[in-house]
Image (cartoon, helix red, strand yellow):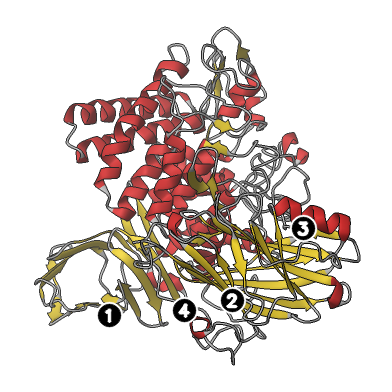
Amino acid sequence: MTPTEHCWGTWTADRPIELSHLPTGFTLTPVLYSARANSASAIPPGELVRFGKRGISNARICFDTSHEETALHWQYDLADPVTMGVHWRCDAHGEWGLRYWVNLCFSAPPGVGFRFDRETGILTSDNESGPQLSVSTAKLPLMATFHDDLPALLDEYADKGYFYLGSRGTSGACAVLRFNLEEAPSMSCRVALNMAESTNSGSRSPIDKPFLPNTDAAAMDDGAEPLENRQVSLGAMTAASDESDVVAEYEDSEAQGALEAIHDVLAWNHVFDPVNERSYTVLTRFWNRQKFGGFGIWMNDVMYHALLWSRYDTEKARRNIEAVFAWQTDEGNFPCLVTGNDAWLDRSQPPVVSYVIWCCYRNSQDTELLQWAFPKLLANYDWWWRRRSLHDTGLVAYGTSLDIGDGLYKGTKLAAKDESSMDNMAVHDPAEFDASTGLIQAADVGLNSLLALDGEILAQMAALLKRDVAAVRLEQQSEAHKRRIADWLWDDSRGVFANRMMDGRFVQPLAPTSFFPMAAGIATEAQVDSLIENYLIPEEKFGGQFVLPSATRDDPAYQDNVYWRGRIWAPLNYWVYEGLRRYGRATEASTLASKSLNLFNQGWQQRQCGENYHAETGAIADQSDTDTFYTWGAMLPALRVKEVFDDTPWQGISLSPFQADGELGPMITAWGVLSILNEGSHWTIRVKDAELMSGTVSGSLNHASLSESSFHAEIGASNINETLRFAGRTLTAATLDEADLKISADTVTLPAGHGGGKFKLSFDQVEQ
């Protein structure tokens, strides 16, 4: 596998349509110039660019630009790590095409320049040794100009306009191929690298499929000559492919649309950090330069990025994990925030890291990841108990360490609230802040639940790694913590889990964090009933068309509609969903997943992924302090995918193939790269393009496990005959709650009227 850092990609945070090849230092930056406005732009993040489809295979990047009312549709075809096609098509003119210029600006590593052949129109790098770049275009550029760098090109346009010929030439440091829309309303070009040591083997990610630009039936120009055969006379792009059309509604199934949307959001925000020389997925490209001073690691956000990436690309998941772990303090905590401007070392964020690492491990089966991460995770877990214990309550509170770092707000209640990641949430309002300890004087139910879950997962890791002493200690500590949460944070008078202050009073404002004890397995069944019936469903609480608001709808804070005071946040929905699934509340979980997807899709119609959402209208941009392309918003459609295939620390793998509603995949799973096809009355699961199993089982397969000789699962009851087929295997025995089932070659039949239960299947080795 070729690492993605060895491929062309949109690596530059503040120039999202710029293509860079990190190993060589070559870059391609499209620059658009409007003579009407005398305005040249390299298209920063914002209203000038609409992020289009990228495709799970990473073989195509599509987007639209709108600079001075001229609309262009773009497509990058990434044939392999070193070759790409670049295409554009003008969809709307804001001025005469003669006066609107599309510039392909090529930059090289230090000491390397370019040569341009006017007869052939081919641009090449002038280095005699090492990687060499070659560029050919469908039509000859109207001119090639050369500059010291990209800013010099922008300055020239601002000062001299498009008629200036003084920079025209045949060689120089920064080369620009110039076209106007009168001559080139559509265009294709080929960019190729001749590597000294080729990286042209292996795929771009574990689930990629081979792709050559403009060679399939859906190419942007049906009559274009394939790019790989073209030197000078490339066919122009005239019609967009189905994958390249920038549309919000996918033609695929609902679940597949969700899977592809998640990848699009992740891929557009995955960048290279030149300050720290690493790649990871930023919160949003819109913040990186101005707000964060060049780079920004907000702990929970980047860990959630790793969680989402683990279904598509284990390397990118690992890069995000490493970006967080790189800043772990000597004290043991993972800092809340580290940017080019500041470092909040005195505070952390809710302890979700062990959960994310475990999920990444389950998908990748990379035991080395656990071995590397475990001691760091344990140090973070112990830090919470050492630095955030709330007097003698046996619980923890959010805070700010007074003796470490010098971050903004250190030593204030605001800093302690920052640690929650939900800084202005109403649940923090009533609690006092102790300036001498740096702790908010209330045990937070969300924090304590996640820390108890953190201990539970760490105990599982320790057992797997055969660290028996640590496993026993962690299990005992986590169980004691859970009992204390159950005893002290359940408000029996209201039938809800709630924050509690040191004087024994419960905090009256509530948040979806009241459901978090479900994710940690703390609640009783009766408590879960109360949470659902009295808080999850009623519209005056957390129910309604769009769910879950960050304050109950009958709380005054809900009307504020500012950040965590009333708006909907994807991570809250995610953890409530996990709790519902852990307790087997499939109906409520499915409703939450469906409403979350509907909320996401409302913004996705405009290719927006919200940092947060208005709880009544579902709007994203109604608040100026809400980002419109924020990565963790993709946790909303992730719930729809989890409805079909999920893998959790408490339930293992669960499958509901009929909920695929068509085809879903490919996805990285513990069983391999997996796809599911639901054909209405029959479903098929494929792993690495080979059929694994198929059947007509209509319910979920829970606690599913697969080995070379057996398959186990819990199956729900059914009133009709159901079958399971295991391709390439000869079945030897099958039971349902220890009762024998009928088998025939590779198929087992579950008779009508069976009551469900524990299903066990044995088979011979896979036939080769």
* Residue 238 place in picture, x, y as percent: 67, 86
Observer-side mark, 2 or 4, equals 2
Rendered-image quadrant of the N terminus: bottom left
Q: Can you tell which of label 2 and label 3 is closer to the viewer?
A: 2
Residue most extreme to the top: 436
User: How far from the left and from the top, in percent, is residue 443?
Assistant: 51, 22
Q: Earlier in the sequence, mark 2 or mark 3?
A: 3
> In this rendering, which labeled residue sits more in front, label 4 or label 1?
4
Q: Nearer the viewer, residue 218 or 221?
A: 221
Q: Earlier in the sequence, mark 2 or mark 4?
A: 2
CA separation in Å, label 4 and label 1: 45 Å
Residue lying at the far right in this picture: please name it.
36
In the drawing, what numbered circle is on residue 136? Answer: 2
Please tell me how crowded label 3 is: few (under 14), some (14-19), or many (20+) other residues with Cα within 10 Å. Answer: some
Residue highlighted by disc 1? 721
Residue flagged by tag 2: what amino acid is it?
A: Ser
Q: Earlier in the sequence, mark 1 or mark 2?
A: 2
Nearest the eye: 698 or 677: 677
10 Å neighbourhood of mark 2: few (<14), some, or many (≥20)? Answer: many
Q: Which residue is mark 4?
A: 212
Q: Nearer the viewer, residue 471 or 761?
A: 471
Instruction: Name the quadrant of the C terminus.
Output: bottom left
Q: Earlier in the sequence, mark 3 or mark 1?
A: 3
Inter-mark Cα distance, 3 to 4 = 30 Å
- In the rendered image, which residue does mark 3 sit on? 41
**Kind of residue indicated by mark 4:** Leu
Q: CA distance from mark 2 to mark 3?
A: 23 Å
Counting residues from the N terminus, which is met first, the one under dot 4 or under dot 1?
4
| Residue drawn where x is 27% and y is 67% of the image | 755
